[in-house]
Every structure is written in C-alpha cells, then in structure tokens.
Amino acid sequence: MPYSLYSNSSTTHLYFKSLKRILLFRSLCSDLSIHQKDQQKLSTVNLAYDLHLGTFKRNEDKIEATNPLIITHGIFGHKQNWRSVAKALQRELDNFVFVVDMRNHGESPHTSECSYQLMASDLREFIQKEVLSRSRFKTVFLLGHSMGGKVAAEFSLQDAESSTPLLEKLIIEDISPTRSSTTTSNNSEFIRNLKSVDLHQTRAEIDKYLKKQIVNDDIRAFLLTNLFKPRGGPFHWRCNLSSLELNLDHLLNYSIKTNNLKQKCPTLFIAGKKSEYLIVDRDKEEISQIFPNAEFVEIRGAGHW
C-alpha cells in the first residue's frame, strides 16, 4: 500500500486521516496487562534505519510533541520505500520518525534465521538503544505493514509480557496477525524470479527480463528498488533472497500465539479494500479477542502493495 499510495489523492487523504486519529488522540487505555516470564536470550542484530527529524534538525532545543514513531516494512521492502510517508507523518506529528530495515532486508545484516520472534527482539533492542536514548518519552508508536505488521503484532505481545513495556500505540497495515498469508502470496514465485536474474546486465535489461514474469508494473518496480550497484561491480539484491526462501514457510504461515494474552494498547488496523490480506468482516472478531481496543479502517481503492 505505501509504494502506490500517492497515485490516488482521496486514498492518501483517508490514509493519513486514519493515522492521525489514532496517534494524536488521547490513549483509550494506558494500563497494559503485564505478565513477566523468562525468555530465552535471542541472537539479535543491529538494524539499519533512517531518522526523519524535520525542523528538529535545525533546532536542537525543540521539544517533541508526541512519542517517537517506528515504521517496519513488509517482505522485500526497505526503509527507503517509506521516505515520503515518514516525512509527511513527521510533519503532522512533530516528533521523531524512525524507519528500520528488518534483518535480511535493506542495509541490515543478512542472517540465515528470520523468524518473527527474532525480528521482534531486534526491534525491541533497537528501540531501547537507538530510540529512547534520543527521546523524552519512554514509550513509542509502532506502525507495521504486511510482514512488518506481523513483526509489530509479535512485538506487542512480547511487550505486554515485559516488566518495562515500550509500546504506547500500535498500527498494523493490511495484514491479519491471526491468519496465514499462503493463499494470497506470490512471494515464492517472486524469489525464484529475482534469483534467476543475471545481475551483470543493466537495470533496463533486468527490468525487461522480469517484465515477462512479473507483469504487474507496480509490483515489479517495487521489487526492483532492491537493486543496488556497488562501485566497480555488478548489481546486488538488498534483500537476502536465500534466507527469505529458506524461511518463507514460517513468514507466510505465522499466526500469532497468545496463550490468552491480550494487548490492550490503542490499536488501529488499516485494510486495503482491494486486498485479501486483511478483510475486516472476516478477521475483525478474531483480532479483537487479542487486541480488545482495536479500531478498523478500510481504504477504498487501495491494494496491498
């Protein structure tokens, strides 16, 4: 949805209106359900990120109006996809906006492991080390799209069990954390397509080759944002295709396991009306059992990508 957001002005208006309503309005509930338990030490990685400061860059004494916002992207995504949205939200919220590269994406480390539990732990460590050290607030807003939405959901339940919760408000875009994505996903085919590319070709030649396999221009253009060319060498893919292929069953089949745990922070679920990844009439009841303070918004004319 973020990649093609600006193609429709009415869609864009409703999208930002929905985000502002949940982030700027007073919290519906501030008392998280805390359940402390011992957790296995996970092998986290340091996430690459962009920090959008707006006028804070010119005025170091300026005070944030709201909690910092963290944005997590979907599979094959990276922080640069969110640059326009992040800048617009920073102007509206007058805060710090961080956009991260999840592990095996963008400029973050490549690893063979790529579970949602690990990615949520990466995110928690990032917030503790990079975000709260800069902010006057002790909690954050979190926005996740697609795979990043499932990371955000997993993080939110880990956070509900923590003795030091970090989450103030949550937005999950166009994904149901209670349902697998296998029936709606072409990701395995996309991985095969990208791995078959001759990276010694020009960008135009690669696009021409992929056009025969990925006919949707928007999706192909989105995937091609992963191409980068180091000085003096052939193209490379920013995302770790081998790890994504290895872990794809987990990434698609994951659905949140709660053990009757609830995340009570104000939560907004945004669904693209043209998408099947989150269908409000189908998914609302099950999601609301885990997120009792959830609101749901459907964006007319919007798909998943």
Image (tube, rainbow, N blue to C red):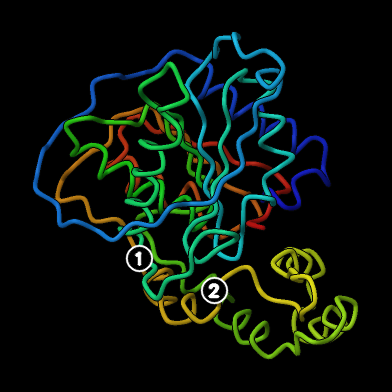
Q: Callout 2: few (<14), some (14-19), or many (20+) C-alpha neighbours within 10 Å?
A: many
Q: Residue at x 41, y 18 (%)?
A: 137
- Of discs 2 and 1, which sits in the foreground? 2
Q: Residue at x 52, y 59 (%)?
A: 108
Residue type at the position of mark 2? Asn
Look at the picture and state if 121 lies above or below 199.
above
Residue named by callout 2: 240
Residue 158 coordinates in the image, percent (x, y)? 25, 45
Q: Position of residue 5 (x, y in %)?
A: 74, 45
Q: Secondary structure at mark 1?
A: loop
The numbered disc on residue 30 is none
Residue 237: name its quadrant: bottom right
Q: Front-most of 197 and 291?
A: 197
Q: Is residue 186 left or right of residue 147?
A: right
Count the marks: how many? 2
Proximity of marks 2 and 1: CB atoms separated by less than 8 Å: no
User: Where 245 falls versus 165 (above or below)?
Assistant: below
Could you tell me which quadrant the C terminus lies in? Answer: bottom right
Determine the CA span between mark 2 and mark 1.
14 Å
Q: Earlier in the sequence, mark 2 or mark 1?
A: 1
Element type at marker 2? loop
Q: Is residue 67 above or below residue 34?
A: above
Give residue 115's mark. Answer: 1
Q: Residue at x 54, y 14 (%)?
A: 64
Q: Residues within 10 Å of mark 1 (few under 14, many from 20)?
A: some
Q: Amino acid at mark 1?
A: Ser
Q: Position of residue 247 (x, y in %)?
A: 41, 76
